Image: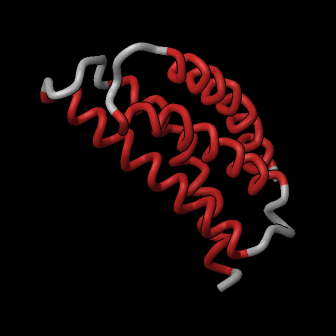
């Protein structure tokens, strides 16, 4: 119960962060297609799906959990790829920044995975 509350609080804090950066990213100049899709679509969608999944974890379907886990995993993989590309100098930016976006989704996957497996 306490873990669910902590994860819910993290997700509630993460959602406006993802939404705000999506709005800023949509109007910013520059950036690759990967960066724009990641910031404008994947991060906010993952945050919203994660919030719904955590809030309804006892009743949500296995298919919804699976879809949420896939979206979160895609976002994490893209964040890691972007951090590597920035670190190598192929893309401009600060390499730790994309990893900040991956923290809550990683926690979300760790929280949801046992429920997903039980429903298999």
Quadrant occupied by the C terminus: bottom right
Question: Measuring 36% from the left and 38% from the top, which residue is drawn there?
Answer: 34
Q: How many marks?
A: 0
Q: Residue at x 46, y 39 (%)?
A: 37
| Residue depicted at 50% across the width and 38% down the height | 103
Occupied quadrant, residue 79: top left
Give the side of residue 1 with respect to residue 7, left or right.
Answer: right
Q: Quadrant of residue 60?
A: bottom right
Q: Which colour scheme is used?
A: secondary structure
Farthest residue in the bottom direction? 120
Residue 94 in the image: state x and y as whole percent. 30, 18
Vertical comparison of 64 with 110: above or below: below
Question: Going 32% across and 30% down the picture, which residue do you hit?
Answer: 32
Q: In this view, does 26 lie to the left or right of 11?
A: left
- Looking at this view, is 114 or 93 the one in front? 93
Q: Whole-percent x and y of residue 68?
A: 62, 59
């Amino acid at each position: 119960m306490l873990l669910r509350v902590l994860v819910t609080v993290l997700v509630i804090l993460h959602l406006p962060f993802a939404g705000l950066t999506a709005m800023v990213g949509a109007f910013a100049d520059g950036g690759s297609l990967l960066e724009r899709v990641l910031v404008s679509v994947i991060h906010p969608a993952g945050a919203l799906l994660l919030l719904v999944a955590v809030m309804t974890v006892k009743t949500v379907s296995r298919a919804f959990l699976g879809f949420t886990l896939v979206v979160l995993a895609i976002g994490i993989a893209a964040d890691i790829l972007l951090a590597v590309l920035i670190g190598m100098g192929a893309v401009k930016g600060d390499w730790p920044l994309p990893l900040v976006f991956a923290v809550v989704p990683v926690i979300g996957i760790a929280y949801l995975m046992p429920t997903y497996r039980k429903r298999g």
